[in-house]
């Protein structure tokens, strides 16, 4: 895996990321970062209006948590026109997730779209531990 803790791969009609983490919390963090980079980036010196938001999610498994968090971030991106620019803190405990995030407002042509993602899927999603890292492959509909 490259210096980043994720790499992008393509399937016939979708796009995905393979993510690496030192533990489950780090795997979730790196999944969020990788997903956000797939969406796009702000133009340099574009004067980004910042917004803080907390996301709370109940979950049954870590795989379902990752899908739920990424789909929530996609909703915020599509509906509220906010793109993640920072993670203040992530809490994961006994079926409960809370993330404190910083977002930038997309407006006035200040954003470069990399991929048009429709949804994050549960397709073949599974966390695996190999040596000292946890890995997950996440597929997204485009």
Image (tube, rainbow, N blue to C red):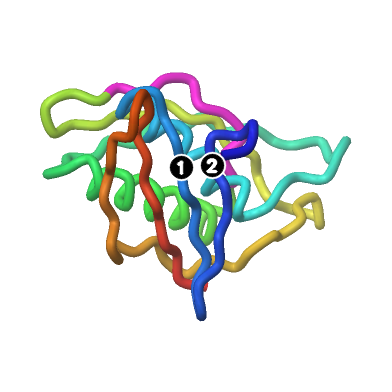
Q: Secondary structure at mark 1?
A: strand
Q: Which mark is residue 6?
A: 2
Q: Residues within 10 Å of mark 2 (few under 14, many from 20)?
A: many
Residue beneath the point at 39% across and 52% down: 137
Residue 84 within the magenta-colored segment of the rendering = yes
The quadrant of the image that shows the N terminus is: top right
- Relative placement, left or right, of 61 versus 50 is left
Residue 75: horizontal and vertical position, in percent?
Answer: 44, 57
Residue 92: horizontal and vertical position, in percent?
Answer: 25, 25
Residue beneath the point at 57% across and 29% down: 86
Residue 88: horizontal and vertical position, in percent?
Answer: 48, 20
Task: Note whether 132 is above or below 20 in the view shown.
Answer: above
Nearer to us in this view, 113 or 21: 21
Judged from this view, the residue extending furthest toward the right is 45
State which quadrant residue 122 falls in.
bottom left
User: Which of the two labelled residues, at mark 2 and mark 1, occupies the earlier sequence position?
Assistant: 2
Mark 2 and 1 residues: CB-CB less than 8 Å, in contact? yes
Nearer to us in this view, 17 or 118: 17
> Marks 2 and 1, Cα distance to the nearest angstrom?
4 Å
Nearer to us in this view, 98 or 131: 131
Residue beneath the point at 71% across and 60% down: 113
State which quadrant residue 47 falls in.
top right
* Label 1 sits on residue: 19
Highlighted range, magenta: 83-91
Residue 120: horizontal and vertical position, in percent?
Answer: 39, 61
Q: Secondary structure at mark 2?
A: strand
Nearer to us in this view, 101 or 94: 94
Residue 56 within the magenta-colored segment of the rendering = no
């Amino acid at each position: 895996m490259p210096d980043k803790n994720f790499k992008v791969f393509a399937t016939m009609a979708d796009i995905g990321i393979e993510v690496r983490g030192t533990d489950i919390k780090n795997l979730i963090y790196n999944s969020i970062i990788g997903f956000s980079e797939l969406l796009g980036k702000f133009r340099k010196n574009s004067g980004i209006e910042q917004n803080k938001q907390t996301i709370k999610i109940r979950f049954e498994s870590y795989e379902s948590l990752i899908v739920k968090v990424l789909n929530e971030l996609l909703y915020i991106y599509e509906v509220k026109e906010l793109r993640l620019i920072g993670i203040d803190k992530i809490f994961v405990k006994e079926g409960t997730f809370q993330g404190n995030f910083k977002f930038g407002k997309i407006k006035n042509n200040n954003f470069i779209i990399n991929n048009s993602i429709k949804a994050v899927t549960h397709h073949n999603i599974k966390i695996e531990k190999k040596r000292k890292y946890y890995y997950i492959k996440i597929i997204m509909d485009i």
